[in-house]
Image (cartoon, rainbow, N blue to C red):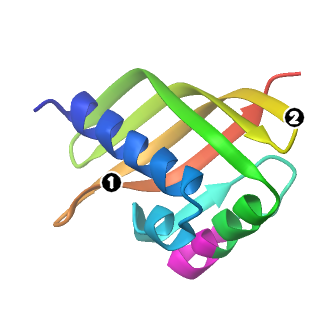
Amino acid sequence: MSVREEIMGIGAQLARAINAGDAATAAGFYTEDGSVMAPGAARVDGHSGVQAYWQAAIDAGLSNVVLTTLEVEEFGGSATEVGILTGSLGATELTGKYIVLWSQTNAGWKLHRDIWNFDA
């Protein structure tokens, strides 16, 4: 399996966890010192911070998340992913783009830095 295919598969699992309301599983896809850098919010670090972020988003009504990979570039034990995202926050439809810095760990590929923004 290619790195792109692995990353796409993990992204699909992450979206499923969020859509199922499972913030703990979502946080498990991040490195121990992983970060979420969401638009309009302070950076959060580590599993507990990432889990709290996703739980708050789920509690606010985040659902129907779909992540679509456009590009993956591997370099050593890291990779970058560029993609587009869609989802819903209550009645509001979301569209945007993201960049993830991935790290290869003993447990496989993990999100290390996750940043996105929404289209106007």
Density class for disc 1 (Cα within 10 Å; few <14, some 14-19, many ≥20) is many
Taking the spot 41% from the left edge, 42% from the top edge, the residue there is 11
Taking the spot 56% from the left edge, 68% from the top edge, the residue there is 23
Give SS at disc 2.
Answer: strand
Residue picked out by circle 1:
103
Q: Nearer the viewer, residue 92 or 34?
A: 92
Determine whether, in the image, residue 30 is placed left or right of residue 96. left
Numbered disc total: 2
Q: Position of residue 26 (x, y in %)?
A: 49, 62
Mark 2 or mark 1: which comes first in sequence?
Answer: 2
Secondary structure predominantly adopted by residues drawn in magenta: helix
Classify 93 as above or below 78.
Answer: above
Q: Nearer the viewer, mark 2 or mark 1?
A: 2
Q: Which residues are magenta?
A: 44-51
Classify 97 as above or below 51.
Answer: above
Q: Position of residue 71 (x, y in %)?
A: 41, 20
Density class for disc 2 (Cα within 10 Å; few <14, some 14-19, many ≥20) is few
Q: Is residue 119 magenta?
A: no
